[in-house]
Image (cartoon, coloured by chain):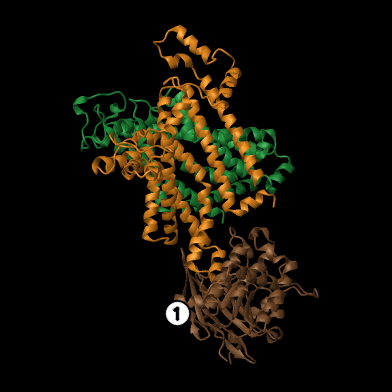
Chain colours: A brown, B orange, C green
Amino acid sequence: MRPLLEIKNLHVRFRTFKGELKVLNGVNMVIGEGERVGLVGETGCGKTTTMKSVLRVLPPPARISAGEIFYRGKDILRMKPGEIQNFRREISAIFQDPLTALNPVFTVGHQLHDVIKYLSKARNGKYLSREEIKARCIAVLEETGMPDSERILSNYPVQLSGGMRQRVCISEALSVAAQLLIADEPTTSLDVTIQDQILRLLARLVEEKNISIILITHAFGVVSEVTDRVYVMYAGNIVETARTEEFFSNPLHPYTHGLMNAIPKLTGEGIAKGIEGRIPNYLNPPAGCRFHPRCKHKTSICKKKKPPLFTTGDNHRVACFLYQR
Amino acid sequence: MGKYIGLRVLQSLFVLFGLSLLIFSASRVIPGDPARVALGPLATEEQVQELREEMHLDKPFLVQYYFWFTSVLRGDLGESLYTRRPVVTDLKRFIPATLELIVFAFLLSLIIGQTIGILAGHFRDSWFDGLSRLISYIGIATPPFALGIFLLLIFSYILNLMPSVGRLSLGLRSSPQITGFLIFDSLITGHLDVAWEAFKHIILPAISLTAANLAQESRITRSSIVENQQKDYITAHIVYGIPTRSIIFKYLLKPSFIPTVSIMGLDIAYLLGNAFLVEVVFMWPGFSRYGVTVMLNKDLNAIIAVVLVIGVAFSVVNLIVDIVVSFLDPRIRLQRKGG
Amino acid sequence: MPEKEFLVAALSKRKDDFLKRWYYFSRNPLSIVGLIVLLLIFLAAALAPYITPYPEHAGAFTNFREASLPPSLTHFFGTDSVGRDVFTRIIFGYRFSLFLVVVVLSLGVPLGIILGLVAGYYKDTWIEIAIMRITDIFLSVPPLVLALAITAMLSPNLLNQMAAVSLVWWPWYSRLVYEITTSLRQEDFVREAELIGASKTHILLREVLPNCTASILTKMTLDAGLVIIVGASLSFIGLGVQPPKPGLGTMIADGARRLPAEWWTAVFPALAIIIVILAFNFVGDGLHDMFAVEEV
């Protein structure tokens, strides 16, 4: 079965005053149809950059210096503008902060209306009437469990609560996403009490529509509940990936161990330990394995060569020389 | 919303009242005898005394103010000590010319300034951006009267393209006056040649008047667009498939336009002020040149009237700008409601 | 001695701060150019009698044999209609412009700042209402118009011009500082100072004011250009520097009357104004960058 999305050896650099930041250092990911994938990593490791590369919305100082991204077998990075518009109808995204993801000077209804209007034109070849579009808007909002959808349409983003704003974004994203949804920390900026609701909503919708999802987060708890497969990213590299069950029962990469140990345990035993050191300076990243300065198990080869993803056991891959066979 | 407008109007009225008090006291506090100044050194003592009584100069200050204020409310701004005509007549004669000039200048700055700003913002760091930035710097640093002189020198004297004085060349019959706006009137009454002449006369003073504003606005719009281009919601719009055209002309433009509108009040203040200079340079027969004349002649009644008229105009403009801004940016409107 | 070490550490931190800020300022080459030009102009104006070729021309001087000469090697910018060297008069003219800037900014600005601090701190009391209403009144008319009117009603000379412009300028600063003060009033550090029992003066001057410095300094540099324009405008109309004194605006008015002949009598003073204002604006931009970084 051909994968839905395949990111191969993606390198992204950012141009700055001081030089080039080598942020993504050869990212490899595979997403299958209907698969629910979790992407974990700490802030600044390149998760959002990867996502923006896939969506082709990287800001100007960034450039893709190497790699390919295949969507249904076609390289997105080499698509012409017309093709890109099409593929925008199939992949969509939810952003971290719903307040900044909505245009503050237009009503929510206005923005949703336009999304649906252009979407239906692209899909059906003609524009729907205003009433039809409005009906679609209300329907799509209600799917997300939004109370009193019709009244919400005439509100401005600043008038809505965080949870409601995120529901609006979700409805925008889901109406567009036919195949793949990328959710970039969709609950991080929400109230704790709402986070759970929104996640469940996402999980349900994704399952109903049978679309793939890449859930970007730094919360393991979420990942363990909602995903089929996990990818761990560190400093611009994928360092481990496995099926979710396998991942939690048998984490392999030293960084993953560090992350797991950093989670406070519900039983209250032991103190959560942080990982020593800091994320690398992207201007002059460490040679070889980017994690080696912080790793307790480093050997001489780690400083010189970047470890590829070695396969161990059942579809479990680790980028660490400890597992070289 | 209505309550907000009402409150603002009340505030403006209070400020105008304070302004009238301020300017009136200034005129009575200055050294010298207004009556004597008005009549000149050749007038006899009886004539001066007569004028003094007419102006209530012998009475206490508050009484003077009361007399003056009540006559203003009746629409009588006193008599010009210089032309001996009611000030109101003079004002009515000269205001349309200035109004036309200011409106024209404002439209120029709006259209050209915004276009340049939008283009510079989209093609940032291109040669266009750099060039417009350079010209903006110079535009902001050039006093309007200096610019007027340069423009006159180049276009009028050297190139002989544009006329140099007044609203219309001598010997040309003007079209019937409807609004007092020469260009508009002549256009709608079909006198196209007159309209063209009027346009040629107005273009140089208008550019001098508004160049600094234009430059400033284009810079602000440009930064605004550059800043908003990076915003998350624009990325979201792109991702959700909204066509580029719609993004540029609607979703990016509206939030970027708001900072410009916010400074429009100040812009118009600038226009109102510098009209005094530009009208002198171009001998434009307007209210501001009248203002300069009465100031140089120490015509107190007229000076007070001029300041008041400008104060009123400015207050009205500020009110309109505030309303437009809160209309464009719902966040301001909603915060006011206590939300 | 621990106090001494503390003092040394504090001083070197200030030096570091200053160096860091200087770095950000200097990253903008235009700002450096502006600064150099400003320094040159200030120096030239200060040393005017000593460095100009014809210092006696800066005043009532006539020499009709040398009148209306175009620019040449002996008279860089030519001579005016009564034979005075334009270049010399421009350098002296800078004195008036710069002096006006110094006076207005050192009188008007502190007044405005103090009033703004007081009004902002005593918000919702009659003090605030009184001060801000007066500020509103002064701001209800464009500054140039008010300055014109005031100068016209007094007698038109340099002193009155300076007084009028200062009078018209302070309200902008009181409004600026008022807005910053009111937004800071609720902040913790102000509350804490109040709790400790610090005097109001201390709070205003030591806690609130430093937060306004960036905005004030930037505004002051950009205002310098505006003050010069207003001053030149007043002189141009005839209400400022009176002939035969060489105010830049006065010179332009004189030259404008004779256009297009003797264009150099109007053009060069105009260019002189433009250059000094450009310099102020470039420096202002650099200052803005310098302070903007701190907010990050």
Name the residue beneath numbered marker 1. A78
Residue B47 against residue C117 in the figure, above or below? above
Residue C282 against residue A84 in the figure, above or below? above
Q: Is residue A105 left or right of residue B84?
A: right
**Please, what secondary structure does the residue beneath circle 1 have?**
helix
Measuring from the top left, give residue C259's x and y in whole percent. 26, 34
Q: How many marks?
A: 1
Q: Nearer the viewer, residue B280 or B102?
A: B102
Q: Is residue C105 left or right of residue C245?
A: right
Name the residue: 45% across, 7% down: B45
Measuring from the top left, give residue A94's x and y in whole percent. 61, 71
Q: Is residue C106 left or right of residue A323?
A: left
Chain holding disc 1: A
Residue A216 against residue B145 in the figure, above or below? below
Measuring from the top left, give residue C59's x and y in whole percent. 31, 25
Measuring from the top left, give residue C63's x and y in whole percent. 22, 25
Q: Is residue B97 left or right of residue A312?
A: left
